[in-house]
Image (cartoon, helix red, strand yellow):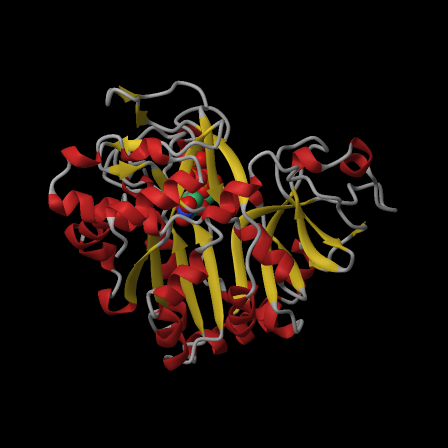
Amino acid sequence: MITKEQALEVLRGKNQEHVMKFFDELSADQQKDFLAQIENINWSDFDLIGSDEASARGEFTVPPAVEISEIQKRHDEFEATGLEAIKKGEVAAVLLAGGMGTRLGFDLPKGCFNVGETHDLFIFQCLINNLMDVVNQAGCFVLLYIMTSEKNDKATRDFFAEHNYFGYNPDYIQYFIQDMACAVDYDGKLLLENKGRLATSPNGNGGWYASMVKAGLDKDLKAKGVKWINIFAVDNVCQRIADPVFVGATISGGFQAGSKVVRKVDPQEKMGLLCLEDGKPSIVEYYEMSDEMAEAKAEDGSLLYKYGVILNYLFSLEKLDDIVNNSMFVHVVEKKIPHIDGEGNPVSPETPNGYKFELLVLDMVHMMDSNLAFEVDRVREFAPIKNLHGVDSVDSAKELLKKNGVTL
Ligand code: UTP
């Protein structure tokens, strides 16, 4: 542990000594925690502020894909392959639930949100219900790892325990906490959450495997014979998890990864599109795409780049080990960061006031040698909850749940 003097020396070297202003007011324990936070700052992130993130992109081509029509034809074959892997315990699921869910504006973890109307139906419950379909089909539980953040870990664990894991076998559930990263103002100055704590936030959804390794869970995965990991977002209440057909299609095709995708309905629709970039799997965000690329047509008149990702990926565990040993790209993202001012008064900004540093799972897809785009029906499998109302909201997700026969 560094001393106060050592911390001051480091901070002075970085022009950040303002964060020590309230240090002498803290209790001994608070001082210890604060010094530990300073010791763990990843200063290299700070060099990225102001650097042009949009580095030159390579040449884009159409990715290998299986469309719904082909999946229907080969359904039984894919399903049998996937079920065999699941029954052998080779497929684990990882729920990414470390996000702050700020757009929803809900105090508890997003998964605790109740979408039920006549009875309770929580987001976490929807996901467990979906996974139970596979458990029942395969006749065995699927290992489920839940990534939380230090901000929502206890609330998440308590919620699952209070609800008896929504019928899942808790022996198959493990939690791990993702890393945090510092937040800074637009001048790159560290912000304080309170007098004894730097403002931090979860470090994005791309740090999940590194956090699993830190928690020692990579050993657990290997000891249990896992070969494939299906990672998925907390907010899509209709998604299929550890879907045997998806698993089977990825394995049968000899791919290192698979991505569930939905067909873009409008050339300008705001979604990340799966492509090949210089022959490697790559996701291009809608704002990075030229109009020409967004509107390019295939021979049959359909959109050439039409596969939008829905944050449901299957990764080969072996390849993840390579990735975690290589450093991932850090994104500098503008956000609203609550903090205290120089006098110690709380500030809750209404508009973005600084930057957070995030790792994104889409960069992991790019680090895979091969990836299969697996098309799913968006009405059946894509109901993300980002907002309360409007696009990708509680309202739209409820409509889709009803369309899929779920009683709310
Ligand atoms: P979003 O990009 O929607 O972010 O996350 P968010 O933090 O949940 O919500 P907003 O932007 O503040 O409204 C997509 C998925 O990635 C997970 C989320 O929990 C969600 O499942 N995620 C995101 C993490 O697990 N950790 C993070 O640091 C960020």
Specify whether 69 is left or right of 187.
Answer: right
In this picture, is 273 found above or below 321?
above
- Residue 102 appears anywhere in the view: yes
Report which quarter residue 11 is drawn in: top left
Percent position of residue 364, x then y: 57, 57
In this picture, is 227 found above or below 291?
below
Report which quarter residue 194 is drawn in: top left
Residue at 85 percent across and 45 percent down: it is: 300
Percent position of residue 189, x then y: 43, 31
- Residue 386 appears anywhere in the view: no
Report the label total: 0
Quadrant containing ligand 1 reads: top left
Specify whether 350 is left or right of 23.
Answer: right
Q: Quadrant of the C terminus?
A: top left
Percent position of residue 38, x then y: 33, 46
Residue at 43 percent across and 57 percent down: it is: 208
Farthest-out residue, left: 27
Q: Nearer the viewer, residue 58 or 6?
A: 6
In this picture, is 73 found above or below 301?
below
